[in-house]
Amino acid sequence: MINYTGKDLARSFRDVRGNTITIAEEIPAEKYSFQAAPDVRSVGRLLAHIALAPRFQLTTHRNRVADITTINFAEVVASSSTEEAKTRTKAEIVELLRTECEAYASFLDGATEAFLAERVTMPPGAQPAAKSRFEMLMSPKEHEMHHRGQLMLVQRMIGLVPHLTRRQQERVAQPRG
């Protein structure tokens, strides 16, 4: 059996968030209003969305919610949308990415194996009918990686080469001996 701990979750989340922060830092402030297409989030709003997304899982698991149907999703979505839409400078968004990362990762650091194994009931009709806290706590990282892919495409659209691409190109260019 693989023993993936809360500390492993925290380390992995910090690594993913670190890459997102690098992208946020590399995109010029004047491009934070850029939208790749109509009806999609601007760079700044997407970064705020990424920063704030783990709050749902943090609140759910910090409060040991055992049944998702006890959560008022309309209220959660309204609150998240309001917070995400706040006007922020580039520096404020980068700081939000850092502080929200640490809040989530610190929680993950303390998650025990027993806690991660607990099952949480999903809404009626959901498949599976219950998920482990471990699976749920991994979802913010998966969500962030999805949006980070969007940000990397945006970087290309505004004339930047993403840092992970640059690193890969440097490795390929190294002489083999």
Image (tube, rainbow, N blue to C red):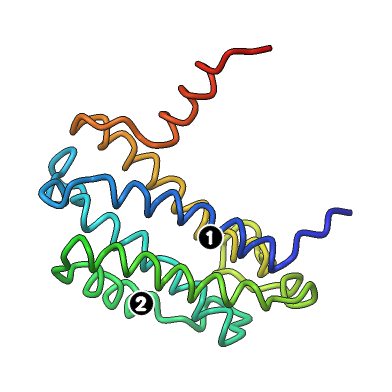
The answer to whether residue 32 is left or right of residue 123 is: left
Quadrant location of residue 108?
bottom right
Measure how far apart labels 2 and 1 are at the Cα level. Answer: 24 Å
Quarter of the image for the C terminus: give it. Answer: top right
Which residue is tagged 1? 14
* Residue visible at 82% across and 59% down in the picture: 3
Q: In this view, does 67 lie to the left or right of 140?
A: right
Residue 125: give x, y in percent of width and height: 57, 62
Q: Which residue lies furthest to the bottom in this view?
A: 63
Determine whether the residue tagged by mark 2 lies in a helix, strand or loop. helix
Sequence order check, earlier mark of 2 and 1: 1
Q: Which of the two discs, 2 and 1, sits closer to the camera?
A: 1
| Three-letter code, disc 1 | Arg
Q: Where on the picture, by quarter, is residue 134?
A: bottom right
Q: Which label was assigned to residue 76?
A: 2
- Residue pictured at 17% horizontal, 71% vertical: 86
109 vs 149, left or right, is: right
Quadrant for the N terminus in the image: bottom right
Residue at image position (50%, 52%) is 16
Q: In which quarter of the image is residue 156?
A: top left
Spot occupied by residue 163 in the image (x, y as percentages of width and height)? 39, 37
Numbered marks: total: 2
In percent of width and height, residue 53 lies at: 40, 65
Task: Judge the density around disc 2: few (<14), some (14-19), many (≥20) Cα neighbours within 10 Å.
Answer: few
In the rendered structure, which amino acid carries the disc numbered 2? Val
Q: Which mark is residue 118?
A: none
Residue at screen point 31% across, 68% down: 95
Q: In this view, does 158 lie above or below 141?
A: above
Mark 1 crowdedness (10 Å alpha carbons): few <14, some 14-19, many ≥20: some
Which sits in the foreground, 170 or 33? 170
